[in-house]
Amino acid sequence: MTAEAIRVSAGWLDLREGADAAARARELVEHLRRRLPSRGAQVIHDLACGSGAMGRWLAPLLPGRQHWILHDRDADLLALAAADVPRPAADGTVVDVETRLSDITLLGRDDLAGASLITASALLDLLTGEELAALVQACAGAGCPVLFTLSVTGRVHLAPADQLDARVAAAFNAHQRRLTPRGRLLGPDAVAAAVEGFRALGTEVVVRPSPWRLGAAETGLAVEWLTGWVGAACEQEPALAADADLYRRRRLREAEADRLAVTVDHADLLVLP
């Protein structure tokens, strides 16, 4: 990502890895398995890979030799990904990993030449419209399947309900669409923009829901997510802060007492050339 991009902490990535794995649409993996080459090594590019969680989830679900090329602009996260490589493939073949320090918004088709598959997780909503359009062109130019998982859709459900839920959600979604030095972020509009962009190039796009469902077993993640969710909403709408402080403390007490269930909607996209 570019210099003004959002930086993601290793701790947050570690905290969410289990929920991400549970949420991703396994149905799309079955579609994907039928479209990958049956012979030779599969070359898989993982864009903005973070600590490598996408590879650890997907590689064991795919058969055959796999060479993963992990792209990220954060050298520390790449080092973590290199140290925690995926388990063997579905047929027991060892998976090997290569890391590349790179800005994924500047990738062209030459950077992805020879790819069997391109993946990314929790990425699209962090891009601007121009960045997404360039990424769509680069991925489509590679002529291989593309699997983008866990893009936010802007829909959140908390139980029990609270009268401030909708106001906080609206402010958070506006924050996700905020204007940055790179341009205006897509936030919850990213899924529709990606689908439109890929389909305009003549590709088939399959979309499936991949919601986080956070209950008592995910209290730590729910607390961290809730704190960030309310904080971003107040940053976007400062007038919300007075009411949101009591709301946040009330919701955190509910989460810590295992009395709060959170559903955060995401969508997964599989692009088939």
Image (cartoon, helix red, strand yellow):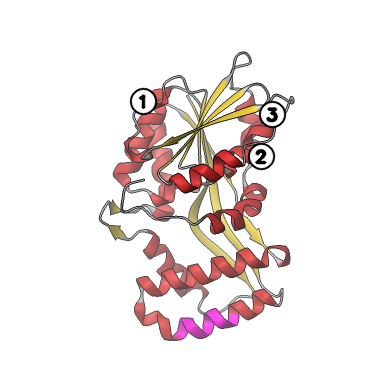
Q: Mark 2 to mark 3: distance in Å?
A: 16 Å
Write the start and end of the magenta stretch as one range.
Answer: 243-250
What secondary structure predominates along the stretch shown in magenta?
A: helix
102 part of magenta stretch? no
Residue type pointed to by label 2: Arg
Q: Residue under circle 1?
A: 109
- Checking the image for residue 26, the label placed there is 2
In the image, residue 258 above or below residue 191: below
Task: Say which of 65 and 256 sits in front.
Answer: 65
Mark 1 or 2, nearer chain start: 2
Q: Position of residue 206 (x, y in %)?
A: 54, 36
Label 1 element class? helix
Q: Position of residue 124 (x, y in %)?
A: 43, 46
- Checking the image for residue 61, the label placed there is none
Q: Position of residue 5 (x, y in %)?
A: 35, 52
- Residue lying furthest top: 39
Q: Residue under circle 3?
A: 89
Task: Say which of 184 and 113 sits in front.
Answer: 113
